[in-house]
Image (cartoon, helix red, strand yellow):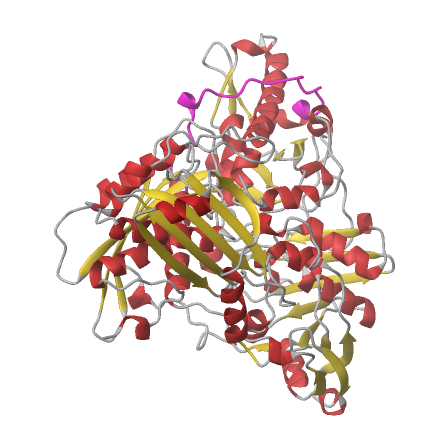
């Protein structure tokens, strides 16, 4: 992927420990010892007949009763990876899916990077996990063949059994596992022909669903450790502010309060902690009440500088001036002066908070120079590194167990809350669970950057663009993580704007970073949420200026020569696939059909996370300016779909996230602080606002899987904005879309 790749960032900062392929096949699950909490520590098997379960490789264990335990090396936050990744293993293992139990892999170098982000889980583990299943199957077949004295090549497997060549005898995996575990793994295995897949490509219910709906699932907030106390932290509310003094007299008098601890600014980058004061108590209620009783004086710093209005004014001024050229072809200035018509537009997008349903939390237990963390984290490696840095202990002495995540969307890539828990556990000498409130969650997030896009174009006499001049100003994520002098700050901001899918002979993209101390981080589909809005809204504006249908205009301008081979972490870009999803979305939506009075259709497409997405939105606007979305048609080309049921749910959730942020979400700064504090002033979509129809279509593909969790989000906002124009003739250039923009 061109631009800044989250997966590249994760890989560059993970432990440099890598196993050889053969070592991976032979290594066993290391004994963990210590405290066991709610099944979060992996089972251990030695390969003996009287032991349970038996380990065939780090990902596969088999119980004597035939239960197959598959360890999934990614975090589950509702995106379905425990199901889809387990399916990869079970497919090649020929396991009986009804006998599969899925376990969360703990932080351990043998699993490689456990970082979960960038829509990378399936696409980066597609081959590795299939090989793990195939290797386990090969060992089981070899064990059976030795018992029978037959050639292993003549044996078959199905539904958790090895079948004798005579077709009459069979041995279940549970009876063979102990023998198989003692065998030398083969040097290589042949993977299945996709034509013989029994699980992959067929809908499967999420493996966690029964526990979730019955309340048995263990989220981070459910973890309980003997002797555990609960902490609530009053963070400094001012951007760049600091603690001056506090009085904890009243807080300590609250029944159940055990300690009050100052928390200094700690860590850096992805595990950077804001200063504050923690109240530590016997339960959550006492901790919250004690926190409310604190008397704190803060130094606000240069608070007057930090407001949404001030930021917008400055960023719009910066967008009017030249920036760093990060992409260019032809001569933009000359072409702009030669066009028969000039079109200009400025697009504004606010800070966004992640707002997962489960507020931020973590449990830590520090014992001497060792620490154990239980947390709903997307990046356990970073949690371990941050804890080690703050406590001054070796990183290898930090164990991290990953719970279910009650939503993530990028927030739990940042491990400040795990660092807080570890710091407080060390301070009081007991296990500590840090629990944030909803207000904390919204006011102390790592926000999706605010951005301003200014685009100018010149059209020729036939309405085709001669020039496209794009200036982008944003609060760079890279600058937030690595400092204001970080190189290549544009790389976290320009993805989606640096690969224009349309033919424009003269094109330039410039970037300017707006420096701010507000914490920033990755939000679902990251920079693509704002670059797609700008690019796909502007191409619609050009179509209108040219007097052309928006779909026909796009198809006429589609640059079919823009294919790239990719390399390293950058996947190839194939324009034919993007064009195909665009055409299919229009076909499924009935583009050009007669609509009810006052309704409009809008379309947008985008390439992100190695996948191709296009969406058509049907919308109308009431007299009071309220937008009504009646139907959304989404088409995705994400390569081979592993679990169609989970994939459809992912796309629907992406569409809803896109609509929510387009219509409602905005983090507002005023007086040097975030004033958005709960769902009354950072509202979610309500049930009546959800479109009655959301259609999802996948392009059938033989290509290996690519990203899915994030690609459905970027096209939503521009498709909606374009639908509003089709319905009302009013252009939307600023998000969120407020009724006052559309009244009158």
Q: Nearer the viewer, residue 139 or 418?
A: 418
Q: Main secondary structure of the magenta part?
A: loop
Quarter of the rendering containing residue 73: top right
Report if residue 187 lies within the magenta region. Answer: yes
Q: Is residue 720 visible?
A: yes
Residue at figure coordinates x 59%, y 38% from the top left: 69
x then y, percent, for residue 603? 29, 49
Residue at figure coordinates x 65%, y 57% from the top left: 479
Q: Say if 101 sits above or below 400 in the image.
A: above
Q: Nearer the viewer, residue 674 or 143?
A: 674
In the drawing, does residue 186 fall left or right of residue 202? right
Residue at figure coordinates x 71%, y 62% from the top left: 272
Which part of the image, by quadrant, shows the C terminus? Answer: bottom left
x then y, percent, for residue 384? 74, 53
Q: Say if 11 sits above or below 362 in the image.
A: above
x then y, percent, for residue 372? 75, 56
Q: Nearer the viewer, residue 691 or 594?
A: 594
Q: Which residues are magenta?
A: 179-204
């Amino acid at each position: 992927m061109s631009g800044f790749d989250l997966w590249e960032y994760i890989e560059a900062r993970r432990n440099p420990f890598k196993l050889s392929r053969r070592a991976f096949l032979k290594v066993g699950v290391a004994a963990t010892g210590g405290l066991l909490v709610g099944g979060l520590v992996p089972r251990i098997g030695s390969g003996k007949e009287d032991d349970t379960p038996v380990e065939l490789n780090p990902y596969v264990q088999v119980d004597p009763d035939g239960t197959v335990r598959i360890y999934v090396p990614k975090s589950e936050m509702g995106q379905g990876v425990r199901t889809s990744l387990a399916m990869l293993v079970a497919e090649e293992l020929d396991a009986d899916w009804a006998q599969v139990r899925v376990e969360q892999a703990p932080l351990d170098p043998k699993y490689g990077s456990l970082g979960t982000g960038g829509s990378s889980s399936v696409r980066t583990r597609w081959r590795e996990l299939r090989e793990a299943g195939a290797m386990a199957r090969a060992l089981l077949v070899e064990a059976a063949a030795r018992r029978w004295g037959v050639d292993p090549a003549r044996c078959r497997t199905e539904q958790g059994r090895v079948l004798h060549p005579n077709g009459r005898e069979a041995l279940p995996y549970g009876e063979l596992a102990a023998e198989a575990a003692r065998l030398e793994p083969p040097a290589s295995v042949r993977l299945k022909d996709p034509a013989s897949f029994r699980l992959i490509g067929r809908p499967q219910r999420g493996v966690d669903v029964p526990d979730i709906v019955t309340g048995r699932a263990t989220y981070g907030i459910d973890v309980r450790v003997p002797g555990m106390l609960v902490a609530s932290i009053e963070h400094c509310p001012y951007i760049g502010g600091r603690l001056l003094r506090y009085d904890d007299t009243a807080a300590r008098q609250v029944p159940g309060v055990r300690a009050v601890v100052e928390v200094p600014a700690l860590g850096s980058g992805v595990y950077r902690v804001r200063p504050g004061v923690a109240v530590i108590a016997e339960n959550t209620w006492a901790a919250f009440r004690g926190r409310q009783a604190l008397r704190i004086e803060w130094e606000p710093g240069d608070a007057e500088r930090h407001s949404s209005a001030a930021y917008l004014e400055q960023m719009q001024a910066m967008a009017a001036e030249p920036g760093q050229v990060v992409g260019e072809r032809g001569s933009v200035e000359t072409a702009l002066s030669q066009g028969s018509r000039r079109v200009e537009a400025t697009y504004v997008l606010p800070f966004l908070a992640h707002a997962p349903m489960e507020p931020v939390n973590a449990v830590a237990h520090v014992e001497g120079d060792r620490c154990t963390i239980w947390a709903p984290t997307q990046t356990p490696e970073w949690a371990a590194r941050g804890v080690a840095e703050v406590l001054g202990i070796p990183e290898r002495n930090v164990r991290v167990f990953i719970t279910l995540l009650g939503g993530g969307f990028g927030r739990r890539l940042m491990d400040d809350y795990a660092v807080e828990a570890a710091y407080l556990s060390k301070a009081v000498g007991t296990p500590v669970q840090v629990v944030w409130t909803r207000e904390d969650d919204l006011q102390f997030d790592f926000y999706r950057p605010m951005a301003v896009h200014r685009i100018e174009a010149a059209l020729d006499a036939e309405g085709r663009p001669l020039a496209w001049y794009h200036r982008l100003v944003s609060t760079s994520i890279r600058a937030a993580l690595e400092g204001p002098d970080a190189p290549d700050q544009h790389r976290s901001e320009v993805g989606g704007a640096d690969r224009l899918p349309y033919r424009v002979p003269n094109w330039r993209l410039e970037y300017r970073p707006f420096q701010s101390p507000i914490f920033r981080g990755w939000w679902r589909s990251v920079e693509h949420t704002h670059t797609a809005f700008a690019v796909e809204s502007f191409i619609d504006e050009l179509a209108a200026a040219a007097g052309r249908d928006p779909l026909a205009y796009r198809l006429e301008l589609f640059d079919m020569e823009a294919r790239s081979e990719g390399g390293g972490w950058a996947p190839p870009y194939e324009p034919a696939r993007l064009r195909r999803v665009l055409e299919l979305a229009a076909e499924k939506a009935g583009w050009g059909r007669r609509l009810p009075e006052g309704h409009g259709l809008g379309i947008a497409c985008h390439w992100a996370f190695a996948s191709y997405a296009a969406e058509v939105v049907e919308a109308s606007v009431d007299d009071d300016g309220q937008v009504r979305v009646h139907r959304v048609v989404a088409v995705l080309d994400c390569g081979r779909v592993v679990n169609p049921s989970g994939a459809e749910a992912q796309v629907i959730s992406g569409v809803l996230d896109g609509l929510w942020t387009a219509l409602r979400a905005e983090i507002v700064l005023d007086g040097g602080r975030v004033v958005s504090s709960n769902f009354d002033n950072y509202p979610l979509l309500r049930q009546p606002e959800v479109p009655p129809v959301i259609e999802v279509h996948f392009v059938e593909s033989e290509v290996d899987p690519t990203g899915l969790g994030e690609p459905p989000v970027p096209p939503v906002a521009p498709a909606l904005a374009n639908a509003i124009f089709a319905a009302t003739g009013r252009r939307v250039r600023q998000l969120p879309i407020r009724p006052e923009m559309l009244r009158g």
